Image: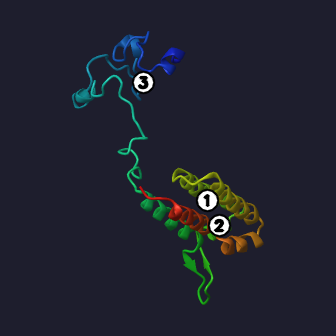
Amino acid sequence: MAMPEDDIFTPNAARSRPPFGGAQARGKVIDQDGRELADGPLHPQFQGFQGAFPEGFRFDFRNSTANPFGDLTREQRLQRLETIAKLLDVAFIVPGTNVRYGIDGLIGLIPVVGDIITTAISLWLVREARLLGAPWHITARMLANVAVDGVIGMVPVAGDAFDVMFRANIRNVRMLRRWLDKQPRF
């Protein structure tokens, strides 16, 4: 049964169809064995849920109670970005050397798909920087780093070596940190 357009655009408006709960609203109810279920009150364990939510009830994911990261301070958010950047770019050391690499280099070994995944994560870091208030020129430079890392990273062997050495995420977070350090605190 399709929902009329009025109900889609105005969810709290009075609806023209009957409320759910009666046989006329839902038709026959058939269980998994093919038997018709009798129309009557709900099972006793579900009686408390009937009408438990008010008419205009809806989920609001923008509210800080729904978002576990909604109450983070600017410094905590920046620390989270630094941690993710370190995990992506310098989390591990090649044994016997000083060469550091991260998950970006490992996931990038998967042809095409790995580079798309790591580029998407890097773009999320840029988005978070924008939400922290980074201006367009900082964001543009961050996007350029991500683009260089993503495009050159697509080259089979040389791109993976470039991913390990270029460290676009570390560069981006440092750039963001330098810009934020120059901004006045409130």
Say which of 47 and 157 sits in front: 157
Q: Position of residue 40 (x, y in %)?
A: 28, 17
Q: For residue 163, what is the image quadrant?
A: bottom right
Compare marks 2 and 1 and give the one earlier in the sequence.
1
Alpha carbon distance from label 3 to label 1:
52 Å
Count every numbered label the image shows and give the total.
3
Q: Is residue 123 visible?
A: yes
Secondary structure beneath dot 1 equals: helix
List the residue tagged with mark 2: 168
Q: For residue 138, what is the image quadrant?
A: bottom right
Secondary structure beneath dot 2 equals: helix
Amino acid residing under circle 2: Ala
List the residue tagged with mark 1: 122
Q: Nearer the viewer, mark 3 or mark 2?
A: 2
Q: Residues within 10 Å of mark 3 (few under 14, many from 20)?
A: few
Amino acid residing under circle 1: Ser
Q: Position of residue 118 (x, y in %)?
A: 63, 60
List the residue tagged with mark 3: 34
Left or right: residue 185 versus residue 106 is left
Q: Residues within 10 Å of mark 2 (few under 14, many from 20)?
A: many
Q: For residue 129, what is the image quadrant?
A: bottom right
Q: Position of residue 17 (x, y in %)?
A: 43, 11
Say which of 151 and 183 sits in front: 183
Alpha carbon distance from label 2 to label 1:
8 Å
